[in-house]
Image (cartoon, rainbow, N blue to C red):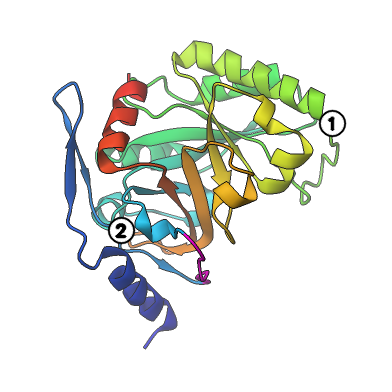
């Protein structure tokens, strides 16, 4: 058997066996359906403690590197939300952003856009570029600021001091938040979080990457809303490996979070 299909089948059994589809009602009267995830992983991790599979709400983050996406298939397989790469720096637009944005919307997958920060350009210019390219859709998830070191950048190896990093982050967050009327989310990694003391940025939801341990352990108990637990996920409807995430809460808590943020 194809090892990719085998991995997908095993994970589908582990993640969805005995877990029914859940429908939660928003305060507005609208409903959100959460399908049990049927995902695989090309490099599964043997989780100690609470595993990602114990969380009911799963989603993905994608860019042009995932190739064309069959969004209805992905939604049926348990993709309950999607963060889609939109921009990078002050002049780069992800080639698949508009296609992914429309596709997720047509499939009724709650979607948000993220910006990959570039440390050799002012935050205000990057915020303007994001605003120019990302629709101000009332039913979209909050925008995301992705801040992490990029050792592979051919044009920018600059690493500002932590206070400068946080100041630039706040510039972007406030400018984008004011435009969209939603408080943005901060995505980051363990090393970046620690070296730049990102916990000092209070009042924002955090989306944390941790592929070898629970974020409570890796981030010293810092509160989190989304957890990116793998970068090698196998998701029906997507041919390439994909980042998979969970929401920190129950189906009812997810509905409540959506009600607060999809306005």
Q: Which residue is mark 2?
A: 37
Residue 256 left/right relative to 66: left
Q: The residue tagged with tag 2: helix, strand or loop?
A: loop
Residue matched to label 1: 160
Q: Is residue 252 above or below residue 136?
A: below
106 relative to 150 in the view: left or right:
left
Task: Tell me the quarter of the picture where residue 9 sits.
Answer: bottom left
Question: Residue 215: x percent and y percent?
Answer: 56, 49
- Residue 185 visible in the snapshot: yes
Is 126 left, or right, of 120 in this rendering?
Answer: left
Residue 174 lies, with reference to residue 238, above or below; the image says: above
The C terminus lies in quadrant: top left
Q: Is residue 66 magenta?
A: no
- The region drawn magenta spans 43-49
Give the image location of residue 156, x and y in percent.
82, 39
For the N terminus, the quadrant is bottom left
As for residue 48 lying within the magenta part, the answer is yes
Q: Secondary structure at mark 1?
A: loop
């Amino acid at each position: 058997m194809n090892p990719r299909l085998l991995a997908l089948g095993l994970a589908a059994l582990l993640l969805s066996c005995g877990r029914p589809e859940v429908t939660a009602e928003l305060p507005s009267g609208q409903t959100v359906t959460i399908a049990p995830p049927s995902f695989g992983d090309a490099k599964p991790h043997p989780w100690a403690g609470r595993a990602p599979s114990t969380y009911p709400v799963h989603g993905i983050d994608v860019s042009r590197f995932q190739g064309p996406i069959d969004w209805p298939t992905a939604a049926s397989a348990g993709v309950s939300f999607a963060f889609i790469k939109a921009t990078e720096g002050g002049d780069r637009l992800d080639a698949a952003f508009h296609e992914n944005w429309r596709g997720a919307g047509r499939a009724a997958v709650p979607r948000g856009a993220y910006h990959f920060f570039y440390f050799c350009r002012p935050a205000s210019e990057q915020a303007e570029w994001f605003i120019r390219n990302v629709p101000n859709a009332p039913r979209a998830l909050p925008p995301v600021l992705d801040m992490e070191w990029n050792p592979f950048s051919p044009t920018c190896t600059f690493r500002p001091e932590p206070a400068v990093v946080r100041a630039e982050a706040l510039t972007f967050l406030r400018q984008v938040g004011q435009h969209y009327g939603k408080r943005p989310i901060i995505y980051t990694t363990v090393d970046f979080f620690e070296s730049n003391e990102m916990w000092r940025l209070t009042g924002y939801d955090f989306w944390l990457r941790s592929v070898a341990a629970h974020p409570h352990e890796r981030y010293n108990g810092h509160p989190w809303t989304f957890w990116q637990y793998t970068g090698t996920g196998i998701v029906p409807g997507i041919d390439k490996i994909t980042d998979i995430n969970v929401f920190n809460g129950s189906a009812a808590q997810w509905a409540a979070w959506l009600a607060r943020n999809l306005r």
